[in-house]
Amino acid sequence: MHHPGIPTGVHVLCEREGCILLMRRAGTGFFDGLYSLPGGHVEAGESVARTAVRELEEETGLTIAPQDLDWVGVVHRLSDTNRIDFFLRARRWAGEPMIREPGKCDRLEWFRRDALPEAMVPYVREALQAGPGPWMLELGWQA
């Protein structure tokens, strides 16, 4: 039996002084105009932790070691297809965040957890509201 792969996303939670770093998506055709965490898709032969390290640097310029990441949760969601998203927390990082991919992001801001923007990717909002973790959410599926 053939088992097609499931697109796998990785999201990195950076918190500082009670605020979460969020990026507003732009120019991608996927949730443009909505805030989300830095992150992206796992590439062939790449671990979830390595994806987090790569995506955080590509998108924000922040550098982090894989051992400075903690597992927070997993979202298994039905979107345009069956998807899995891993959420990791960065305990520490080096650098100051900046927009490194202006064709994919037009704003980068820190938000208090209790004051997240209205315009936010829905499953990312639910993940952030799920608490410190570990947790697992299934979204968009019929019971």
Image (spheres, helix red, strand yellow):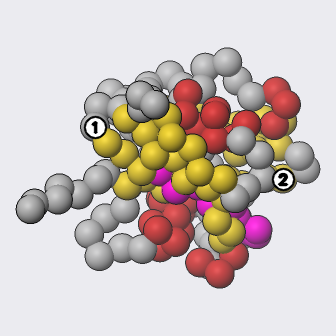
Viewer-side residue, 49 vs 107: 49
Residue designated by label 1: 81
Q: In the orientation shown, which residue stands out farthest toward the right?
A: 17
User: Which image quadrant is residue 90 in?
Assistant: bottom right
Query: Which residue is depicted at the point 71% across and 41% down?
Result: 130
Q: What element carries label 1?
A: loop
Q: Position of residue 45 (x, y in %)?
A: 29, 76
Q: Is residue 69 above or below residue 108?
A: below
Q: In this view, does 45 lie above or below 83?
A: below
Query: Which residue is depicted at the point 50% across and 22% down?
Result: 33
User: Which image quadrant is residue 108 in?
Assistant: top right
Viewer-side residue, 108 vs 74: 74
- Viewer can see residue 108: no
User: Which image quadrant is residue 125 in?
Assistant: top right
Q: In this view, does 53 lie above or below 102?
A: below
Number of numbered markers: 2
Q: Which amino acid does label 1 sit on?
A: Thr
Residue designated by label 2: 16
**Residue range highlighted in magenta:** 85-93
- Viewer can see residue 91: yes
Query: Which residue is depicted at the point 36% across and 73% down?
Result: 46
Q: Does the magenta stretch include residue 86?
A: yes
Q: Earlier in the sequence, mark 1 or mark 2?
A: 2
